[in-house]
Image: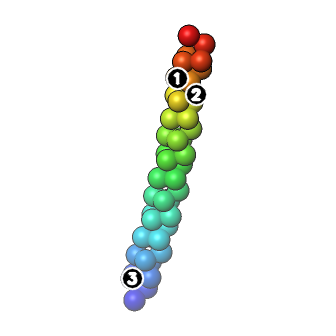
Amino acid sequence: MAKIIDFLLCLRMFASSCVVRVVYYGLLFLFIFILYLMNICVRWCVF
């Protein structure tokens, strides 16, 4: 019984860290994408 509880706790910790990682990389990707779009807009406006 205790092993099952340990396993569930481990699984929950892993899932939460996985979600945090996905959110972190998602935000990072979004930030880079916005910078890239801004760069294109600046080039279009300047030239």
The mark tally for this picture is 3
Which structural element holds mark 1? helix
* Dot 2 and dot 1 residues touching (CB under 8 Å): yes
Q: Amino acid at mark 3?
A: Ile
Rendered residue at 40%/75% (across/down):
7
Q: Position of residue 39 (x, y in %)?
A: 56, 23
Task: Tell me the quadrant of the picture where the C terminus can be found.
Answer: top right
Q: Choose between 24 and 11: the one closer to the eye.
A: 24
Image quarter (top left, top right, bottom left or bottom right) of the N terminus: bottom left
**Residue 4, numbered label:** 3
Q: Which residue is mark 1?
A: 40
**Distance from label 2 to label 1 (Cα)?**
5 Å
Give the residue displayed 45% in from the left and 63% down from the top: 14
Residue 5 placement (x, y as % from top left)? 44, 82
Residue sitting farthest toward the bottom? 1
Question: How busy is the neighbourhood of tag 3: few (under 14 within 10 Å), some, or many (20 plus)?
Answer: few
Q: Look at the picture and state if 21 lies above or below 44.
A: below
Figure colour scheme: rainbow
